[in-house]
């Protein structure tokens, strides 16, 4: 058992009330209690508070020492005969402070004990409150020589030490007669005053609650959330292939299952697509070169040659010029030789503008007149360059080609969604694009940097009621199954394949190939409810009790799961379907 220390040191806060200080004093189990006071301890600067503190110490048979150097507290301590030491290394004594205040004869200490802040006369100083007192000066605790009756003015400069051992011995001698009779009772009282460590208890309580919550959460996750079961059921069902030539009629028609004539819904959507293409042609809009030429038509034999008409093209170096006047011929004799020559020079203008037409003197060929030649004795001049881009047919064709290669999958999906929303099953093989209406922002030969081709196309897709298609499939395989024992489990419409449609004015013909599954019907939702929470053997027995079931395989996840989960949403049941005869 731990022994109770004979001395205790308690530090007082500057904002502690007198009731708080008294509680700290009473809670101490030591006989000698040293209260270390802060600077400006205003609570004990009241004679009433000091008296209450002294009374509480006497009632608990404790020896009280105030550790302070506050000069204002010394008269009050002297008046109430409270021992004071300037520090923990000094010996305690009742200070000598003449003029210490006294309490009135009718002072009610029990009533004052209930007050936290007794009222004082604020018009009087502390010295005035302590007049007409005669404290017992110089009392030492424990007894000491008269040389120690005064405290040093500087508490930090003293080398004296509080002799707690002597204080304990003196206290023991003073209470020797009462010690024996009160030892047992005091021991029980001290044990009853022991304060439990609530912070430690609360910590353990929180940790325990947290651990319990974690275990509960772990249990829920491991045995409620994660467990799942995958059940594969094999049956004696079989696949029956059906090949049907459908005739899709307008929605106003009626179903003819025997002849595979189905009312259909036509869904259309119009799209406008544009494609821009840079112009690749060029045209020189500069000034045209001009000049003059002379013509000759050979030797003067036969009749006179016909004149060359105005607007005839003459070409030299691959460049063509246009005559501006007609050229008539007459005989010209030179050195005894006679030739037909143009009677005057003929002005010509370049067919196109451009500086490249400024050619020097040249020989020309005359369009349509092999009997005539032409030449210029001086250069052509005046041609300038002003090149502009022009649209060519190839530019428009390239833009159209890009439009035709655009992805139409989004349009197809849009038509499928529209048909499904209207309650029809889309037949994607009937997706077609109508003839485009094409317009261009510029014509061939127009001056432009680019040309924009706009194409408006109407896309179409047909759909039919799923129930109508199921009736047609049922009619197609009716002769292949025993309807008294077998039923159609899956009509195979989701995996059906279609041929190329043939469109006429009033109908669309298309072939459909599908593989229907026939056998004993099993309701997966009902089976999941029946096996929920069952062990593996029991679950397999329940499923096998249904007609047509040949085998049941159950897989669990995670590895520690050994039975079917109670939550039906965690159970996946798959009916193993046979393959069609075409895939065997």
Image (spheres, grey):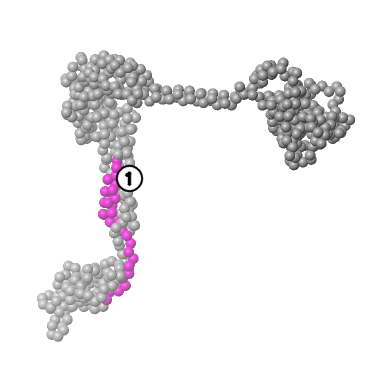
Residue 396 is covered by the magenta coloring = yes
Name which quarter of the figure residue 430 lies in: top left
Q: Is residue 82 above or below residue 293?
A: above
Q: Is residue 263 above or below residue 352?
A: above
493 left or right, relative to 39: left
- Could you tell me how many numbered marks the image carries? 1
Residue 540 place in picture, x, y as percent: 28, 17
**Lateral position of residue 554 relative to residue 119, left or right:** left
Query: In this image, 253 relative to 105: left or right?
Result: left
| Residue 55 seen in the current view | yes
* Residue 235: image location, x then y, percent: 23, 20
Q: Secondary structure at mark 1?
A: strand
The single residue placed furthest to the bottom in the displayed view is 335
Residue holding disc 1: 273
Residue plotted at (57% across, 26% down): 200
Q: Quadrant of the C terminus?
A: top left
Residue at the right extreme of this rendering: 132
The one nearer the camera, 533 or 455, is: 533
Looking at the figure, which quarter contains the N terminus? Answer: top right
Is residue 12 shown in magenta?
no
Residue range corresponding to the magenta coloring: 379-408
Residue occupying the point 40% across, 22% down: 224
Q: Quadrant of residue 185?
A: top right
């Amino acid at each position: 058992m731990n022994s109770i220390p004979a001395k205790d040191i308690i530090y007082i806060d500057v904002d502690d009330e007198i009731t708080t200080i008294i509680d700290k004093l009473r809670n101490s189990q030591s006989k000698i209690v040293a209260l270390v006071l802060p600077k400006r301890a205003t609570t004990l600067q009241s004679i009433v508070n000091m008296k209450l503190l002294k009374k509480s110490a006497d009632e608990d048979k404790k020896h009280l020492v105030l550790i302070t150097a506050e000069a204002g507290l010394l008269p009050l301590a002297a008046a109430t005969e409270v021992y004071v030491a300037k520090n923990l290394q000094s010996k305690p004594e009742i200070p000598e402070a003449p003029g210490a205040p006294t309490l009135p004869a009718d002072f009610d200490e029990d009533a004052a004990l209930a007050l936290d802040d007794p009222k004082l006369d604020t018009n009087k100083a502390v010295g005035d409150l302590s007049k007409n007192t005669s404290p017992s000066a110089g009392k030492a605790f424990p007894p000491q020589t008269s040389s120690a009756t005064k405290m040093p003015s500087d508490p930090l400069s003293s080398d004296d030490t509080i002799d707690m051992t002597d204080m304990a011995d003196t206290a023991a001698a003073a209470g020797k007669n009462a010690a024996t009779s009160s030892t047992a009772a005091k021991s029980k009282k001290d044990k009853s005053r022991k304060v439990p460590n609530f912070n430690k208890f609360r910590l353990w309580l929180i940790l325990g609650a947290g651990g319990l919550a974690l275990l509960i959460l772990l249990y829920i996750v491991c045995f409620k959330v994660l467990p799942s079961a995958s059940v594969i059921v094999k049956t004696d069902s079989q696949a029956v292939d059906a090949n049907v030539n459908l005739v899709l009629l307008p929605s106003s028609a009626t179903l003819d299952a025997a002849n595979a004539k189905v009312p259909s819904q036509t869904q259309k959507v119009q799209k406008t697509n544009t494609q821009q293409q840079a112009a690749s042609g060029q045209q020189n809009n500069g000034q045209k070169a001009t000049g003059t030429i002379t013509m000759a038509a050979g030797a003067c034999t036969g009749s006179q040659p016909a004149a060359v008409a105005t607007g005839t093209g003459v070409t030299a170096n691959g460049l063509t010029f246009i005559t501006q006047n007609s050229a008539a011929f007459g005989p010209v004799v030179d050195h005894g030789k006679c030739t037909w020559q143009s009677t005057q020079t003929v002005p010509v203008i370049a067919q196109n503008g451009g500086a490249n037409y400024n050619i020097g003197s040249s020989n020309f060929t005359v369009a349509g007149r092999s009997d005539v030649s032409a030449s210029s004795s001086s250069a052509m001049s005046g041609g300038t360059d002003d090149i502009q881009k022009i649209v060519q047919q190839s530019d428009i064709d390239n833009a159209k080609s890009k439009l035709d290669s655009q992805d139409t999958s989004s349009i197809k999906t849009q038509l499928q969604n529209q048909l499904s929303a209207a309650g029809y099953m889309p037949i994607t093989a009937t997706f077609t694009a109508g003839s485009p209406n094409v317009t261009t922002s510029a014509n061939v030969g127009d001056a432009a940097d680019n040309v924009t081709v706009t194409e408006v196309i109407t896309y179409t897709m047909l759909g039919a009621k799923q129930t109508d298609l199921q009736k047609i499939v049922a009619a197609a395989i009716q002769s292949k199954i025993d309807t008294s024992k077998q039923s159609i489990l899956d009509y195979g419409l989701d995996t059906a394949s279609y041929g190329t449609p043939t469109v006429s004015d009033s109908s669309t013909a298309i072939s459909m190939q599908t593989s229907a599954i026939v056998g004993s019907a099993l309701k997966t939702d009902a089976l999941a409810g029946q096996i929920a929470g069952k062990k593996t053997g029991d679950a397999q027995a329940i499923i096998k009790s249904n007609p047509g079931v040949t085998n049941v395989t159950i897989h669990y996840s995670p590895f520690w799961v050994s039975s079917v989960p109670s939550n039906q949403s965690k159970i996946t049941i798959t009916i193993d379907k046979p393959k069609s005869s075409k895939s065997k």
